[in-house]
Amino acid sequence: MSANGYRDYFKVLGLDRSADADTIKRTFRKLARKYHPDVNPDDKDAEAKFKEISEAYEVLSDPDKRRRYEQFGQYWNQGGAGVGTSGDVDFGRYGNFDDFVNDLLGRFGGPGGGSPGPGGFGFGSGFPGGGFSASGFPGGGFQGGGFQGGGFPGGGFNTGFGGGAAAANLDAEAVISISFSDAFRGCERTLAVNEERVQVRIPPGVKTGSRLRLKAKGNLQPGTGRRGDLYLTLKLQEHPIWKLDGDQLRGELPLSLDELALGGEVRVATPDGEATLQVPAGISLGRSLRLKGKGWPIKGGRGDLLLTPVLRVPQQLTEQEQALFEQLRELRSSNPRSGWLQAGRL
């Protein structure tokens, strides 16, 4: 403070005079966390600094106060009410740091509240002033690089502080992509939420559209510390072989011409290994073969695995195979297109 009592609030916050509202809010959050008395117990200098930056934020975050401050300098508030944080602050009335900052930002003219959009608050939209902004989980299982937001420095949730009506719905939602293998076996992933790391357990057998609920990890209500829940909707990545059909797992079974014609035992792939399957002689390509208990995890066990035969014709034949196929063509007694030629006429 200068000798005449004038405080350069921009200098107090370490900002240029052209700083916009979002920059002012972001900077205050960072400094408030650094100098808060809970973080610096019995440190009078830190407490004094905290009151100073709070005073600066009160003025610069209010468009009308900022306009008068920039126009009249030290005389901006002549005849007006004093700055609310220049006196003592009763920190004991707040349960934690977030409660205090939420109340402070709400009282000091942050963006107003509002009503939730259709379907609650989603990632990147819905909650006034921010909401969630996320692309997935870190650590490999989920695509993306963790939850990022406009809240405290380092990411996390933007709580959309405001002095208007409290939001009716504090829940948040996100769509998360996971691999087919993780969905089949189940997995654990670490989620970065508002500077805390949360373990998320994904049970075996989830499907596209499955929802997981993380209690009290949603949007934060200004001034109260209340938080909604976070709902994760799962989306399975495609697999080169397996596809889900309800509770049944399906895939193609490549067979050679002789295996289709003669049948016999063949080794087939399953999601967790291999199995032996009896192929009937003369099986048609449209018929599926069932392996019970080898499919997708379901309540109480495993579903069935359905394999649909497909013909795999070799791209190259040995001389002996070539000769045998030519011999087969001469000896073949049936015409595979019998009746088909006539039935195709309109």
Image: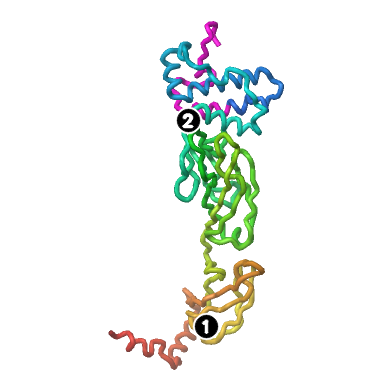
Q: Residue at x 62, y 76 (%)?
A: 292
- Mark 1 lies on residue: 260
Q: Height in image: 303 above or below 86?
A: below
Location of residue 334 with respect to 294 vertically, above or below: below
Residue 214 is a magenta residue: no
What residue is rendered at 63% in x and 40% in y? 196
What is the x, y in percent for residue 47?
64, 20
Q: Quadrant of residue 186?
A: bottom right
Q: Residue at x 46, y 42 (%)?
A: 115
| Magenta segment boundaries in residue numbering | 1-30
- The answer to whether mark 1 and mark 2 are in CB contact below 8 A is no
Q: Position of residue 42 (x, y in %)?
A: 71, 21
Can you identify the residue that label 2 sits on? 22
For the residue marked with disc 1, what is the amino acid?
Leu
The amino acid type, in three-letter code, at marker 2 is Asp
Badge 1 crowding class, 10 Å Cα cut-off, few under 14, some 14 to 19, many 20 or more, is: many
* Residue 295 position in % (x across, y down): 60, 70
Residue 290's place in the image compared with 231, above or below, is below
**In which quadrant is the C terminus drawn?**
bottom left
